[in-house]
Image (cartoon, rainbow, N blue to C red):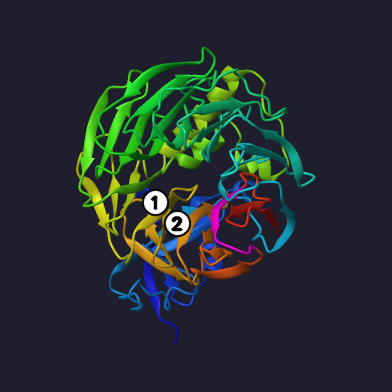
Amino acid sequence: MTQTVLVQFKSESGDEAGAQVELPTNLRPNDLQQICDALLQTEKEDRVPFIFFINGTHIKDTIATTKDENDVPISLDNEKVLEIVYAPQAIFKVEPVKRCVSSMSGHGEAIVSVSFSPDGRGLASGSGDTSVRLWDIDTQSPLCTCQGHKNWVLAVAWSPDGKRVASGCKNGDVFIWCPKTGQRLSKNPLIGHNKYITCIVWEPMNCNPECRRVASSSKDTTIWIWDTVLQRCEIVLTGHSMSVTCIKWSANGLIYSASQDRTVKVWRGEDGVMCRSLDGHAHWVNTLALNCDYVVRTGPFDPEMLHRGSTVIPEDRNEMARIAQDRYDKVRKGPIKKDMLVSGSDDFTMFLWSPEDSKKPVARLTGHQQLINDVKFSPDMRYIASASFDKSIRLWNGLTGKFVATLRGHVQRVYQLAWSADSRLLASASADSTCKVWSISNKKLMCDLPGHSDEVYAVDWSPNGEFVCSGGKDKILKIWRK
């Protein structure tokens, strides 16, 4: 006889969906979806796919066979009410990339950074050959080469409207380029840093529809905020005592910076005032991730619309800024109503912060055996993925920092990660010369992407979900698709 249990469905924010119902424990996610839709009285055309959790554990098979992170079956008591949390998934589904459709040569040195444009139609790469290259995704061919840097190009970043590309090099110079022509938008570089550039970020579109301000961090311990139209520095942020390794610019106007001085600092982007310093790490802080990173990156370009092939984006900048603000407001109305920040360090740990309102960490994330090189929030903000030199990738709960799973398969250091727009897949780049694609629902390797002949330093997944791009020591840029 099948066991039954009394169930209460709840949303991620704790709202109850209908009355308690008695259900058999052999129900699968598809069955739970139908029951939840009925309780919510959702019209067929408005239905959204859900994933279901018991005590934070994803229901993959049946209620009865669900196990926690220690592989222990969930306790079911028919005298107690079992809470099942339902969480919406992206309506569209990104297909896993499986084959290399192009190997694009041209760079004369290692490729250290690759980035798709916010609409997924443009691609920029930075290399040790001192050039920035722009590529045509439709034809998988070179579009133009941007010459001007005198040293390794370490960082490239697209403006939120996709109309400009910023790049920074080992000499400390910052250039702004036109992605259609490859021409410099100024005769001279933005000069101010006296050591190499470590990171570049643009001001989010909802903060400034003109998309004219960009921030650069450097090994010289400073962060400079530039006006790219007037070609001058507006503000210099000083306060770190060692190299600034990573910066993020949130849609709430705050700038977050990580440094080798073991701190993370919070600044106001409008006037450069430092709000607070987040202390706790015992070694260099290498990387940062914001839960709203994906919304900031894509701005007015909704990945769901891009996935459907829609290219109808308003030309009016104020309207684009409104769309970007609406998307940011929407994610803050969910279960996570504020910015969450995660920092990864050489001390093998990560901290999860709520930096808008507290200096104290929400959680300390331990488990990696070597330094953490990259962290990324999933677009739906539900997961954090971390890449380490211990050859593993770890998944964590994006709200609590609770450990979820370890993804093993790489045999060398893992350098960089990239999420698919629907948060169901994760791509990784490694020193073992491969990229890999992982299934988040199954917590398993989905497919290998071999082909590079040396270490793979950089990987990115296009916002429209169609392509993955990878580059590394072999100087070849590879495009992967389903």
Query: To which quarter of the image does residue 349 belong?
Result: bottom left
Q: Which residues are magenta?
A: 452-461
Report whether 310 appears left or right of 213: right
User: Of marks 1 and 2, which one's residue comes earlier in the chain?
Assistant: 1
User: Of 306 and 50, which appears nearest the observer?
Assistant: 306
Residue count near mark 2 (Cα–Cα under 10 Å), binned few <14, some 14–19, many ≥20: many
Tell me whether circle 1 and circle 2 mark residues in contact (CB < 8 Å): yes
User: Which residue reaches farthest bottom?
Assistant: 1
Q: Is residue 455 magenta?
A: yes
Three-letter residue code for mark 1: Glu
Give the residue number, with chain letter if any, for mark 2: 86
Is the residue marked by circle 1 packed among few (<14), some (14-19), or many (20+) residues within 10 Å? some
Q: Residue furthest front?
A: 150
Element on which disc 2 rests: strand
Left or right: residue 348 compared with residue 307: left
- Give the answer, above or below, for where 62 lies relative to 235: below
At which x and y percent is residue 30? 56, 66
Residue 318 location (% of width, % of height): 57, 18
- What residue sits right under mark 1 in the picture? 12
